[in-house]
Amino acid sequence: GPRTNDLELLNWENHIQYSRKLILPHPWMHIRRFVLKPMCDLSPALVHPLLGLTMSQLLEKVPDVLRVHTLDEIVELSL
């Protein structure tokens, strides 16, 4: 059914967990540019606990080619 809130937990102190309710790290974060770009802005050297690559390295390899806009870019485009 409809969800009122949807919180995606991507990573938590490099904790690895597989359960029915929670999978850490997020299983698709490494293939989503809209996740990796802000992660690189915040912590480019953060290492993915399963893949052993930094967020910057993952962003370089991400197959997602869609452009990620910053909030400033969106505001500028709307003017």
Image (cartoon, rainbow, N blue to C red):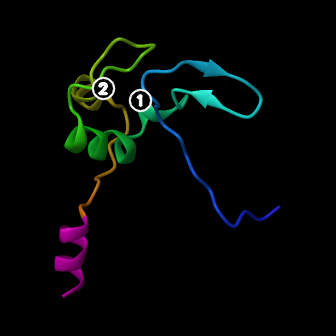
Image quadrant occupied by the C terminus: bottom left
Note whether 23 is above or below 42 in the view shown: above
User: Could you tell me the amino acid type at mark 1?
Assistant: His
Q: How dense is the environment of label 2, judged by Cα within 10 Å: few (below 14), some, or many (20 and up)?
A: many
Which picture quadrant has residue 20? top right
Nearest the eye: 59 or 21: 21
- Which residue is more in the foreground, 21 or 31? 21
Q: Are marks 2 and 1 in contact (CB under 8 Å)?
A: yes
Q: Which mark is residue 30?
A: 1
Q: Who's the residue at 26% across and 60% down the image?
A: 69
Q: Main secondary structure of the magenta part?
A: helix
Q: Residue furthest bottom?
A: 79
Asked if residue 15 lies left or right of residue 41, the reply is right
Q: In which image quadrant can residue 76 be found?
A: bottom left
Magenta span includes 61: no
As shown in the figure, which amino acid type bears the numbered disc 2?
Answer: Leu
Q: Which residues are magenta?
A: 71-79
Which residue corresponds to mark 2? Answer: 58
**Where's the N terminus, which quadrant?**
bottom right
Q: In the rendering, at what x and y percent does residue 43 appear?
A: 23, 35
Label 2 vs label 1: CA separation?
A: 6 Å
Report whether 37 appears left or right of 10: left
- Estimate the x, y position of residue 53 in percent, counting from the top left: 30, 16
